[in-house]
Amino acid sequence: MSKLDTSPYKGVRDFYPEDQFIQNHISGVWRKTLESFGYNEYGASILEPAELYKAKTGEEIVNEQTYTFVDRGERTVTLRPEMTPTVARMVAARRRELGFPLRWYSIPNLFRYEAPQRGRLREHWQLNVDLFGMEGVEAEVEIVNIAYRIMRNFGAADKDFIIRLNSRKLVQKIYSLFDINDDNIQKVSKLLDKKAKISEEEFAKGVREIVGENADAFIELINSPDEIFEKIGKESAEVKEIFAVSAALEALGVTNITFNQTLMRGFDYYTGVVFEVFDTHKDNPRSLFGGGRYNELLALFGDEEVAAFGFGAGDVTLKDFLETHQLLPAYSSSTHVYIATLSKEHYAEVEGVATRLRQGGVNVAVDWTGRKVGDQIKTADKQHIEFVMVVGEDEIGSGVYKIKNIRTGDELSVRLDEINDVILPKIHK
Amino acid sequence: MSKLDTSPYKGVRDFYPEDQFIQNHISGVWRKTLESFGYNEYGASILEPAELYKAKTGEEIVNEQTYTFVDRGERTVTLRPEMTPTVARMVAARRRELGFPLRWYSIPNLFRYEAPQRGRLREHWQLNVDLFGMEGVEAEVEIVNIAYRIMRNFGAADKDFIIRLNSRKLVQKIYSLFDINDDNIQKVSKLLDKKAKISEEEFAKGVREIVGENADAFIELINSPDEIFEKIGKESAEVKEIFAVSAALEALGVTNITFNQTLMRGFDYYTGVVFEVFDTHKDNPRSLFGGGRYNELLALFGDEEVAAFGFGAGDVTLKDFLETHQLLPAYSSSTHVYIATLSKEHYAEVEGVATRLRQGGVNVAVDWTGRKVGDQIKTADKQHIEFVMVVGEDEIGSGVYKIKNIRTGDELSVRLDEINDVILPKIHK
């Protein structure tokens, strides 16, 4: 028989313990930050009826950019490409029982069918945060504050990133000034979305195609926040909202904020304020994650609208950010102590030592391969386990055990009854 | 437009916070137990090349019982139905660098395409534990001990479950006594596997079809462990191994073990000792989980064999066990304190109180809906949040805050600077 290939499927990742350690670090910081703000974890299957996406995204995109297939019961199934439709579905299903405001988070894996490239794989994990049932700007402020605290909790400084704010309502007002109608809104929004990535000429050409003779005025306006505020009116609800959000954020100590009038954040379902966290490092100048208000999505499931504000943050772009800014922690094994053994004669006594350590909260692996002690220690070293104990007749006879830190070479001799007291402070740093 | 359906896809589950709480409890106990024995977490994608399963399982089963589809790059992809092929693939890919013995665990979600029924859904989560590179019975003993400790760590008593042991090598010896050849081995193994679930007549009929005129002798032997040990020989390697495993387990305090000569544990790749944990409750008499030795699987990827012993334990059957034995913990929200507010005038001060609590490790949600205080408290109650603080002008003016436990009705008055010291002992129980 021919040999089986050991590669994973194209565009997805294997997580060896060193990789899983980083994933756990990332989800740990996410979890801790979200729960501190009163968010509760929920979850769902990666399998969803394809209809869930077709309603808002369009059949073509679902068929071309997602994993969608027909099951043997003739149901069309999609591997979820985003979490918002799922959370909207779940909240809609129990809107009477849940109680609002509702604060939820989840860390799902998501799938998209496209050619893998830096920062974009076919499967990635994403933090999803949603606040339902709070209509005022306090929701905007809380969510953007959370995004900021997450970055700080990863060790980022204020100068490492900037938070961009915009409002779909404000953009809508600009469109109406130029009589941009429904047919052209999507086109011009897409154009604004990619403005920073294309040349001025290309942008101008696109605007001319949509706005016609008023193109120059449109371009002048879209390049000047001050003129936008002036034109829409400083006392208009749209402008006041943006100013209220940034003022409240500054009061909470979030000062690396900027207004960005071309920020759109892809999804069609956004209805108000949108934001994104942008990496300011010259080697990685890119959007890290973002979100916005989407008050109309729940109405798709019937009944009335539910105020909603949320964001999603992917693991791949975040890991790139942490690498670029040297904020990734060094790997350490979850195993604290490796016991190398000299003979199976003392099996019961050695396992007794291991059990005592485990009961005290120390994670212990025992090597029963019968190899030379040097080879057993090499395994501990290869697996990044910090402490080694060699246990043989001498140790069991005397009741005194040597614990060696194989990274530093430090060695300690301890009695069995004091072993946990000695090791615990060294491992739970 | 017609309303979207709020149901999940057939045979999978939504995890509302109360459900996710149970999932987190289960994976928390798994994680803690495994790491205490020196196992490191790894992970992988749910998408695997279909070839990975076809080698050992057969094309027909893969096509009929798994989610397998062709992607647009003409690759055949399977949603993983089990984790062992994946872990074997990953270990084989880096066998030179990893260092043995290797202790790994993972908590993947797995998929199978079948009609959903009690204890068997289309998607479930499973603890997977594997010990590579230890050939002696110390591996068997460690893994079965871990299975035992997991059950105890969930709160189960020894009488709640029993651990069944068998050896594929021993069964093989029995087959050879009756000249059962390769063609019939799978048939007779399947028959033994379901012996407990079918009538004596049906079993006898099946045996006669395979063994022919020696059927009665076979049935007599298979019904008597003592005779099996006698026939194979008490000094044979196969019998000695089983006795060594149970003796070592008893020395470690694991005494609810029994030899079960018809235990097979499905998978074809098992080569030695197999075991399962069985629920002894009269309302739920069933196998909870199990595993065994599979020394030949890694050879599929080339090179030599690697000693391997492992098991998988699913969340659905475990949850049934915990429910039956009343071992599921009561839900409590991860949010400790709910702040009800009287006016947005004090926004900055209230958020300041929340920030101070969060910095001390208290998880806090703030209600800015502007509803009546009674309605705000009702939301906290609906969401199972234990403590409520109503913060208004009086509290901010006096610097004294009331914290009420809405479950017990107990109320405390505390100054802002002592708030964390008062609340922390009450929430981290």
Image (tube, coloured by chain):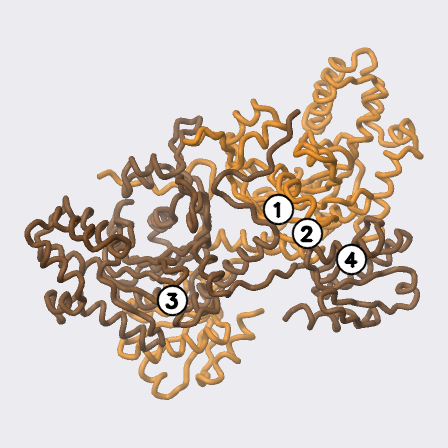
Chain colours: A brown, B orange
Q: Quadrant of the N terminus of chain A?
A: top right
Kindly identify which chain the residue marked by label 2 belongs to: B
Q: Quadrant of the C terminus of chain A?
A: bottom right
Image depth: mark 1 or mark 2 in front? 1
Task: Check contact, mark 3 vs mark 1: CB within 8 A.
Answer: no
- Helix, strand or loop at label 2? It is helix
Residue tagged 1 = B127
Image depth: mark 4 or mark 2 in front? 4
Picture coordinates of residue B194 (x, y %)?
A: 69, 27
Give the mark nearer the N terminus: 1 vs 2: 1
Check the image and name the residue furthest to the top. B213
What whole-number distance in Å separates the C-alpha atoms at marks 3 and 1? 38 Å
Image depth: mark 3 or mark 1 in front? 3
Q: Which mark is residue B150?
A: 2
Task: Check contact, mark 1 vs mark 4: CB within 8 A.
Answer: no
Q: Residues within 10 Å of mark 3 (few under 14, many from 20)?
A: many
